């Protein structure tokens, strides 16, 4: 009887010990799991707020305008990795920019960098925010006419601006200029001469020696436009001397140099720019001033029941044509009856 009671007591005691040990291990396991979840959850929260979200999706009409700023040769020189993968044909390079370059923050030419343009003009930042497409469209349709001249990273840095990229990274920033006051300058010590300088006997006694004067410039003159004026004069290509006695007013030539949106008139003698104006398409697709015939960039189609039309984004000229039906769908504009 005593032996059975002892065996029962010993068995129960061992069961209690095993329960305590199991609970201890379970508690330790739960603590480890809790710590693991805490350690790996924290960085994900921070990462979601580390990048600025930019709008890079463009409609076909917007891409047509942006394409006027695209230079395939520049794009190829800027991005040899693209040329290696896609070749150097203009169509292939443009397709890469549309499908990848825009969203990767690549520049479409050496003369226009969208992030430099964004950094330069606070009014545009206030109007467009992080919509990158809007900056391209603004420069192509308004910025050039408004003479907004800061369009590259180098120009932005020279203007004292910091340019940031698609992920908020710094592309370029001005180098600070450190000035040292006279009090802070470290004095320079010249070594003592090893021997007394030889006496100069090329001058009369009591007269200090002077360096020989430089020979006068013989002036190699070219007729150039004087900056910020409509006049020109002979300007020395060596020393920059302007002969004011021969200054005269610029005279406009009969021809114009044109782009898709502007024409400019140059002086027939010095070739300096006299005027730069937007085309005047008041009565059609031909400029009334320079006779430039617009190379249309068409907007989206407008549909009617029997015809469709589209309007040029540059000269505002509209063209109307009847639908070309095939199985109830217009093969030109895609309209379905």
Image (cartoon, rainbow, N blue to C red):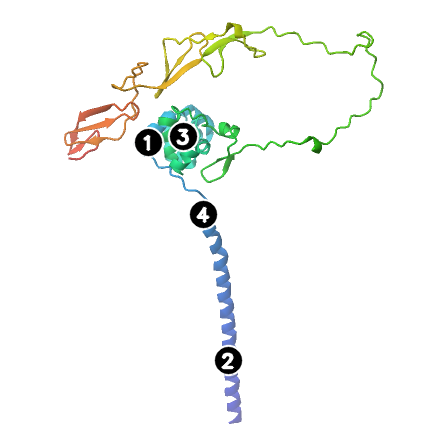
Q: Is residue 48 above or below residue 148?
A: below
Q: State the separation of the CA atoms marked 3 and 2.
A: 74 Å
Residue depicted at 52% across the width and 74% down the height: 21
Q: Residues within 10 Å of mark 3 (few under 14, many from 20)?
A: some
Q: Secondary structure at mark 1?
A: helix
Asked whether disc 1 touches disc 4, contact meaning CB atoms under 8 Å apart, the reply is no
What number of labels is visible? 4
Q: 2 or 185: nearer the eye? A: 185
Residue depicted at 36% across the width and 27% down the height: 142
According to the picture, the residue beneath numbered tag 4 turns out to be 49
Q: State the separation of the CA atoms marked 1 and 2.
A: 77 Å
Image position, residue 271 (x, y; %): 44, 11
Dot placed on the residue nearer the N-terminal end, 3 or 4: 4
Q: Is residue 100 visible?
A: no
Q: Secondary structure at mark 4?
A: loop
According to the picture, the residue beneath numbered tag 3 turns out to be 86
């Amino acid at each position: 009887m005593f032996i059975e009671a002892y065996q029962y007591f010993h068995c129960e005691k061992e069961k209690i010990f095993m329960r305590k040990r199991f609970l201890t291990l379970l508690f330790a396991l739960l603590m480890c799991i809790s710590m693991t979840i805490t350690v790996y959850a924290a960085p994900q929260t921070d990462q979601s707020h580390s990048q600025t979200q930019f709008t890079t999706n463009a409609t076909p009409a917007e891409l047509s305008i942006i394409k006027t700023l695209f230079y395939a040769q520049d794009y190829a020189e800027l991005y040899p990795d693209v040329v290696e993968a896609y070749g150097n044909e203009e169509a292939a390079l443009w397709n890469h920019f549309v499908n990848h370059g825009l969203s990767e923050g690549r520049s479409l030419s050496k003369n226009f960098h969208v992030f430099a343009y964004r950094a330069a003009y606070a009014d545009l930042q206030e109007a467009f925010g992080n919509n990158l497409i809007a900056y391209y469209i603004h420069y192509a349709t308004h910025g050039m006419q408004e003479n907004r001249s800061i369009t590259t990273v180098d120009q932005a840095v020279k203007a004292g601006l910091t340019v940031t990229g698609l992920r908020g990274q710094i592309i370029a920033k001005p180098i600070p200029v450190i000035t040292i006051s006279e009090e802070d300058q470290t004095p320079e010590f010249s070594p003592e001469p090893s021997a007394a300088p030889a006496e100069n006997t090329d001058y009369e006694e009591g007269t200090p020696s002077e360096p020989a004067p430089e020979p006068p410039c013989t002036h190699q003159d070219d007729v150039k436009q004087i900056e910020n004026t409509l006049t020109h004069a002979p300007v020395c290509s060596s020393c920059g001397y302007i002969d004011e006695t021969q200054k005269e007013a610029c005279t406009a030539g009969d021809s114009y140099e044109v782009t898709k949106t502007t024409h400019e008139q140059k002086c027939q003698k010095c070739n300096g720019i006299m005027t730069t104006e937007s085309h005047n398409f008041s009565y059609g697709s031909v400029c009334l001033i320079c006779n430039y015939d617009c190379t249309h960039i068409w907007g989206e189609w407008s549909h009617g029941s029997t015809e469709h039309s589209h309007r040029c984004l540059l000269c505002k000229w509209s063209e109307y044509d009847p639908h070309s039906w095939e199985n109830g769908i217009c093969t030109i504009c895609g309209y379905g009856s």
